[in-house]
């Protein structure tokens, strides 16, 4: 069993280095978890970064990398979730609810 960094590295051959670095920053200490926890860890990190972005008073080009990071984390989360098709719908529903709650808490 590999950790999430190794799992992400296997997928990130065409990912720009800046985005890879920002994904690592967003994951923080969570990079030490196993690949089996990739779905929940990536959704957690994406939600946290999304909440941070939504809390900002202004946004512009300076948030582009963070928006791409949220997108990448969600993509990785669903790539990991797809390994267990029986629970994919459950993960998708839960993630959508979390992201909607994040958006609604800042309106």
Image (spheres, helix red, strand yellow):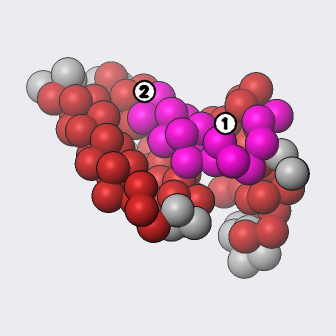
Residue depicted at 27% across the width and 48% down the height = 93
**Left or right: 81 with respect to 8?**
left
Instruction: Answer whether residue 58 is visible to the viewer in this image.
Output: no
Give the image location of residue 80, x and y in percent.
Answer: 58, 59
- Residue at disc 1, secondary structure: helix
Residue depicted at 49% across the width and 42% down the height = 43
Q: What separation in Å lies between label 1 and label 2 (alpha carbons)? A: 14 Å
**Left or right: 96 with respect to 39?**
left
Residue depicted at 48% across the width and 48% down the height = 70
Give the image location of residue 38, x and y in percent.
Answer: 64, 47
Could you say which disc has been placed on residue 52 in the image? 2
Residue depicted at 73% across the width and 70% down the height = 11
What is the span of residues highlighted in magenta in the rendered image? 32-48
- Residue at disc 2, secondary structure: helix
User: 10 Å neighbourhood of mark 2: few (<14), some, or many (≥20)?
Assistant: few
Could you say which disc has been placed on residue 27 in the image? 1
């Amino acid at each position: 069993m590999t950790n999430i960094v190794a799992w992400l590295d296997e997928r990130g051959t065409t990912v720009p280095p800046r985005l890879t670095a920002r994904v690592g920053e967003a994951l923080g200490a969570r990079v030490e978890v196993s690949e089996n926890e990739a779905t929940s860890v990536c959704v957690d990190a994406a939600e946290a970064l999304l909440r941070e972005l939504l809390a900002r008073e202004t946004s512009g080009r300076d948030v582009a990398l963070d928006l791409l990071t949220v997108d990448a984390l969600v993509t990785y989360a669903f790539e990991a979730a797809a390994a267990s098709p029986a629970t994919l719908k459950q993960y998708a529903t839960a993630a959508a609810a979390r992201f909607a709650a994040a958006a609604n808490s800042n309106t």
